[in-house]
Amino acid sequence: MSFVEEKSNTNPNSITPKKKRTPSWSDLWLNNTTKPLKHVVFTMQLPSLSSHKDTTKTETLIRNFSNIDRTRLLSDELLLQILSKLPDSQRNPNSLVCKRWLNLQGRLVRSLKVLDWDFVESGRLILRFPNLTHVDLVNACLISPQNSVILLSHRLVSMHIGSGFSQNWRICEENMLSGEMIDTGLRALASGCPNLRKLVVIGASELGLLSAAEDCLTLQELELHRCNDNVLRGIAACENLQILKLVGNVDGFYGSLVTDIGLTILAQGCKRLVKLELSGCEGSFDGIKAIGQCCQMLEELTLCDHMMDDGWLAALSYSENLKTLRLLSCKKIDLCPGPDDYLGCCPALERLHLRKCQLRDKKSVRAMFRVCEAVRDIVIQDCWGLDNDRFSLSSVCRRVKYLSLEACSLLTTEGLESVILNWKELQNLSVVSCKNIKDIEVSTALATLFSTLKELKWRPDTKSLLASSLVGTGMGKRGGKVFKKTRGQQWLPID
């Protein structure tokens, strides 16, 4: 129906007036509303107009809002270079800006410690972090109970456990993923991260490590927990491997054996090794000899809590380029090392580090210093049984330039002096927390030696050091000052 009526036939020049349109409910409502509300409704109706001339300010604002993100003008490569210059503390806030920044930040991550195995098996790890070079899968391979507040920690591994205790005292073995699942995850990781350079894993089999060796040709560092001889067949394909850490047995967590068979397989397959650490591993003269003969680039050897058979010390002389020997938490050194002529010597050895080792057996200590007589640096920390008699066996090492003693409670000032006065090349000396070494017992000859050293750290008796710092305070003596707290939260002495 038209709002304008047709012209009359009787009088063509006459036009009837227009009929008023019946007001709708929206018109009545708008006429009674306030001005700000009219503006709101009007703005909501503007996008429905089809004419280009009626383009509204709202459409202009929308276009301007889409252009606020100036980083869209930058390529991914250029934006990656900018984000890589920012400190690591800003990575998490930057990833919350938008999805693009989240993906770019994931491409910048190189090292990752995985806690959830589903993240690996589902492929989300590769999509989220495609450029990983260092991956730690140990915690992801262990099944921890939900909401557990009990943390069982070791120097090598830690995990949350339930309130019950393991009957065989091997908690990790009872709460570990199956070997098939771990191998599947390793294959997915190796295929998605061909530039992987460091891998830490527990419970892997020979097949899983073979897939990592074949796909990750740049793999240089490997740490295997719960390792055995069969697993070592897989790492023989890692031709570029330079750093290797094998963990066989950890009391209370898991048990596994690495013997001379595994060490021989390792020596024949990984000939470019530079650093090797054997923790909780068995072996004997034959295994250490094979490593020395085949791994001619080996410079650093670490034995932690070893279970080596007697006579293994003599095999160290086959490592002609060995520069650093570390013994950590070893309950024994070598109870039957053999005669001196059979022991030999490591001609290139420069550093000998002993930490938390049992040095009670005099024959073992004597053989150790005999093999390491060319050493330049000696560090002994928290070792049991090192008295004057056993420390005097180190006098065979006449080229020592640096000596560090810490927590050697049985060693006295006389025992220390009898050795270091014969070391003509000694330049640096550190003595800390050795309670039987006294300042008042320092002789004139020893004081003269101190004056010629380049560096001296002398804190043998911590009790005397504390007493000297409390002189004049009245503390540290019976009947001294006692303190009480006042209402103003201040400590005041009581006379």
Image (cartoon, rainbow, N blue to C red):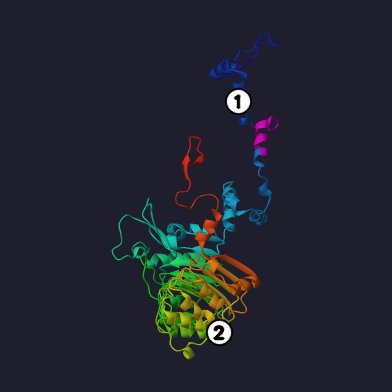
The kind of residue tagged 1 is: Val
Q: Quadrant of the N terminus?
A: top right
Residue 404: give x, y in percent of width and height.
55, 70
User: What is the residue that sits farthest to the bottom in this orientation?
Assistant: 341
The residue mark sitting in front, 2 or 1, is 2
Residue 164: x and y, percent? 30, 57
Eyeballing the image, is 481 above or below 381?
above
Q: Which residues are magenta?
A: 50-64
Q: CA distance from mark 2 to mark 1?
A: 86 Å
Q: Main secondary structure of the magenta part?
A: helix
Q: Can you give x and y, in whole percent of width and height, for residue 249 in the image? A: 39, 71
**Can residue 196 be seen here?**
no
Residue type of the residue flagged with mark 2: Glu
* Residue 84 included in the magenta stretch of the image: no
What residue is shown at x 55% (from left), y 84% (from top)? 320
Query: How many other residues sit within 10 Å of disc 1, few (<14), some (14-19) or many (≥20)?
Result: few
Q: Mark 1 falls on what kind of element?
A: helix
Q: Any magenta on residue 54? A: yes
Q: Which residue in the protein does label 1 denote?
A: 40
Q: Nearer the viewer, residue 325 or 127?
A: 325
Q: Quadrant of residue 26?
A: top right
Q: Image quadrant of residue 43?
A: top right
- Residue tagged 2: 320
Camera-side residue of 413 and 26: 413
